[in-house]
Image (cartoon, grey):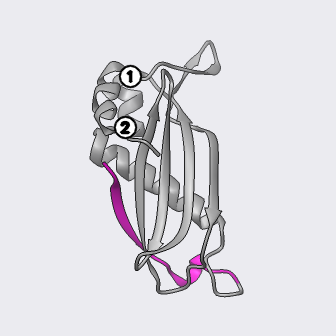
Amino acid sequence: MAYETERLVEWGDCDAAGIVFFPNFYRWIDGHYHRFTKACAFYDQRTLLADHGLLGTPLRDTGCTFHAPARFGDVLTIASKLTKLGTTSLSLTYVFTRNGTLVAKGMETRVMVREVDGVIAKAPIPDAVRSRLAPLVEAG
């Protein structure tokens, strides 16, 4: 099941050449991830801490390939898919399009973590979270 949102490219998102400054794609991926987990899996970073003692879901790996420029005023569709659910981690892909044109493809792997004796350590995905996420996993 893909989860989709739209993003209007604003003037401040662009560089001197008038195209989206590439770090903004990573910012949008991060925001989209948090909307995805709230909408599809019914948890956010606060509930992970309150309900499961987890500090959050920091990145282990991320990347983005750019295919076409996005400019001020463009409306981008961001579609994500949960592609892998491991013991402690989850992986997602992101596709950015503009009117059907591929703009960028991103990916990330996040790890559940908690603090153990003052050290941040990976933690198993709680069963309650896993049961919400497992039905959403689909191939790449």
Q: Is residue 44 left or right of residue 124?
A: left
Crowd class of label 2 (few under 14; some 14 to 19; many from 20; radius 10 Å): some
Dot label at residue 108: none
Q: Is residue 93 left or right of residue 134?
A: right
Q: Tell me which amino acid carries mark 1.
A: His
Image coordinates of residue 74 in percent, x first then y, are 47, 83
Residue furthest to the right in view is 16
Nearest-to-viewer mark from 2 and 1 = 2
Q: Is residue 76 left or right of residue 39?
A: right
Q: In the rendered image, which residue does mark 2 sit on?
A: 137
Dot label at residue 52: 1
Looking at the rendering, which quadrant does residue 22 occupy? Answer: bottom right
Q: Tell me which amino acid carries mark 2.
A: Val
Kind of element beneath mark 1: helix
Q: Is residue 18 left or right of residue 126?
A: right
Image coordinates of residue 89 in percent, x first then y, are 51, 29
Magenta stretch contains residue 127: no
Residues in magenta, as a range:
1-15
Q: From what the image shows, is residue 21 above or below residue 78?
A: below
Magenta stretch contains residue 4: yes
Q: Do callouts 2 and 1 mark residues in contact (Cβ within 8 Å)?
A: no
Q: Which residue is pictured at 39% across the width and 37% down the height?
A: 46
Q: From what the image shows, is residue 100 above or below residue 48?
A: below
